[in-house]
Amino acid sequence: MAAGVIALIGSLAHAPWLMVAGGAAAVPICLVSFVGVPALLPAGVVMAVGASGLRAVSTRDVLTAIALVTLLVGGFGYEVLHQDPAQWETADGSAGSSNVVTTTESVVVLGAVAPALAVAVAYARSFRRS
Amino acid sequence: MSEIVDAPTRSARTAGRVAAVLLVVAGGAFMVIHAATGDEGGPEGWLQHLSFGLP
C-alpha cells in the first residue's frame, strides 16, 4: 500500500523518480505471495512511466530511492522472514502456525512505513520547489 | 536533480496514476486476505493484518 502511495505522490507531484522507487519497492513485496503476483503489472507500469520522465539522476534521487526501498522492503521482509512459531488453544483442541506476525513485527513495519512516507512527501515538496 | 524532458504523454501519466492506485488497492487486498485467511483464535489481530498490507 505504501509503495503505491509513494508512486501516487510521485505521479501527482510530477516527480518521476518517486514512481520508479515506489514501483521498485513493490516488486519484492508482491513476490512474497502468489496473491501479490497480479500487482507486479501496476508496479511495472509505474516504474516504466516514471523512468520515461527521467533524464538525469542525482545523488539525492538515488539516496531517496535507497531509503524508500530499504524501509519498505526491509520492514516487510523482517515481518515475513523472521520466524515466529506459535500455538494456541481452540474450541476443538489446539492449533499452531510455523510463523505468525507478532506485535513487535507489526510495530517495526509501522515504524518503517511512516518515515518512508515522510521522506517521499519531503522529496516531492523539494522537487516541486526546484 | 531529475529533470522532466520528454514528459510522459497524458495517457502515460494517466496509466501511471491508475497503476499507482492499483498498488494501493493491492495493499488493501493483502490486508483483507491476510485477515480472512488468518487462523481463527490465533494470536494475530487487526494490527498484524494492517502491517501485512501496509508496505
Image (cartoon, coloured by chain):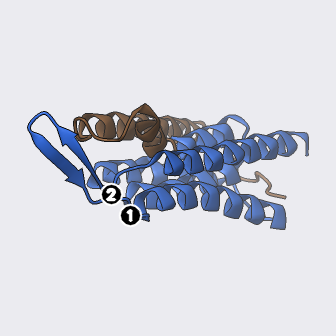
Chain colours: A blue, B brown
Say which quarter of the image contains residue B53.
Answer: top left
Disc 1 residue crowd, few under 14, some 14–19, many 20+, Cα 10 Å: few
Residue at the limit of the structure toward the left, as seen here: A92
Taking the image as shown, residue A80 lies to the left or right of residue A38, namely right
Q: Which residue bears the numbered disc 1? A: A83
How far apart in space, not on screen, are marks 2 and 1 (Cα)? 5 Å
Name the chain under label 2. A
Q: Secondary structure at mark 2?
A: loop
User: In front: B45, or A50?
Assistant: B45
Can residue A27 be seen?
no
Q: Amino acid at mark 1?
A: Gln
Q: Position of residue B13 (x, y in %)?
A: 59, 39
User: In front: B22, or A30?
Assistant: A30
Taking the image as shown, residue B40 lies to the left or right of residue B22, namely left
User: How many badges with numbers are in the image?
Assistant: 2
Residue B50, placed above or below residue A38: above
Name the chain under label 1. A
The residue lying at 44 percent from left, 47 percent from top is A42
Say which quarter of the image contains residue A58.
Answer: bottom right
Disc 2 residue crowd, few under 14, some 14–19, many 20+, Cα 10 Å: some
Asked if the residues shown at circle 2 and circle 1 are in contact, with their CB atoms under 8 angstroms apart, the answer is: yes
Residue at the limit of the structure toward the right, as seen here: A130
Taking the image as shown, residue B18 lies to the left or right of residue A98, namely right
Q: Position of residue B10 (x, y in %)?
A: 60, 36
The lab-note entry on whether marks 2 and 1 share a chain reads yes
Q: Which residue bears the numbered disc 2? A: A99
Q: Position of residue A97 (x, y in %)?
A: 25, 54
Q: Amino acid at mark 2?
A: Asn
User: In front: A47, or B24?
Assistant: B24
The residue lying at 36 percent from left, 36 percent from top is B29
Can residue B3 be seen?
yes
